[in-house]
Image (cartoon, rainbow, N blue to C red):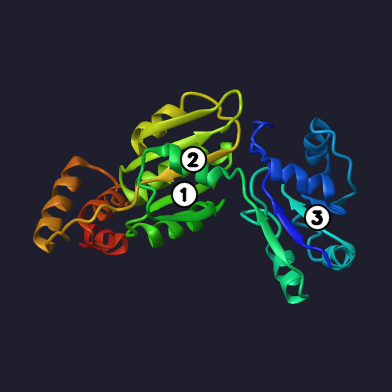
Amino acid sequence: MGTLYLVATPIGNLEDITSRALGVLREAGLIAVEDTRQTRKLLAHYQIRRPMLSYHEHNKLARLEQVLAALAQGDVALVSDAGTPALNDPGYELVRAALAAGFPVSPVPGPSAPIAALVASGLPTDAFLYLGYLPRRAGERRALLEEVAGQPYTLIFLEAPHRLGSSLRDLRLILGDRPVAVARELTKLHEEIFRGSLSEAVAHFEAGPVRGEITLVVAGREEAAVWSEDRLRSALQAAREEGRTPSQVAGELAARSGWPRRTVYRLITEK
């Protein structure tokens, strides 16, 4: 009976792989990979030649029986294109199926973009909430952010470069002008970690096209006394006089006052 090894691979720099991970890859009877072209580069760099099986988002359920059959004969290593498999990459269903079939499952720890970004962000690391990729649609994205706006934990998201600007603006709108770290191309030649407020991040990344893999680390809501209704209404009146939109005001004041954004929005739109 073989073991299913979950092998973390580099997120950029090929030297960021452990000796244990290389040993597992060299000895595995089969390597299940998200993209054979991507993994082949890593294996070639370390002169590893083992059978590979394509295992990705679109065929992961169809491949389960093949991987389980391989496990009956020996060890199988699961890798994603980069980082830790089964963390925002295919693998969860395979882990469940292997455990249900009685096969051991063992992690081979290593690179992880969310953790790397978190520890370099300068934001609290003692408690955090990882939420993967932000929804593509603005309405769904804002609804998710409203759900977590009151959480005191550091928030971690992944984002595609072409949606970074709109996501940063939504983060500022819903969460208020919190501290953020935008980690781009971690461990690669053009690594960048921007640290500042969400407003500063919006301005910084509007300067030109953005490339690369991106991780967002956002400060959690600071614990503070909830404003009284009189204080909130006073702030709302001041905002009205400034001519700002209800949506802008609701996001900012919800973050500052401790009141739910929906309630703030209702109050500001009252006749």
Label 3 or label 2, whichever comes before in sequence order:
3
Q: Position of residue 144 (x, y in %)?
A: 45, 59
Picture quarter with the N terminus: bottom right
The disc at residue 156 is 1
Q: Is residue 229 above or below residue 135?
A: below
Task: State the CA–CA distance, disc 1 to disc 2.
Answer: 9 Å
Q: Is residue 14 above or below residue 99?
A: above
Task: State the CA–CA distance, disc 1 to disc 3.
Answer: 26 Å
x 79%, y 66%: residue: 61
Q: Is residue 250 left or right of residue 206?
A: left
Q: Amino acid at mark 2?
A: Ala
29, 91: nearer the viewer:
29
The disc at residue 55 is 3
Q: Amino acid at mark 1?
A: Ile
Label 1 or label 2, whichever comes before in sequence order:
2
x 59%, y 37%: residue: 213
x 60%, y 33%: residue: 212
Q: Position of residue 231 (x, y in %)?
A: 10, 56
Q: Secondary structure at mark 1?
A: strand
The disc at residue 117 is 2
Label 1 or label 3, whichever comes before in sequence order:
3
Q: Is residue 46 above or below residue 238?
A: above
How packed mark 2 is, by other alpha carbons closer than 10 Å (few <14, some 14-19, many 20 or more), is many
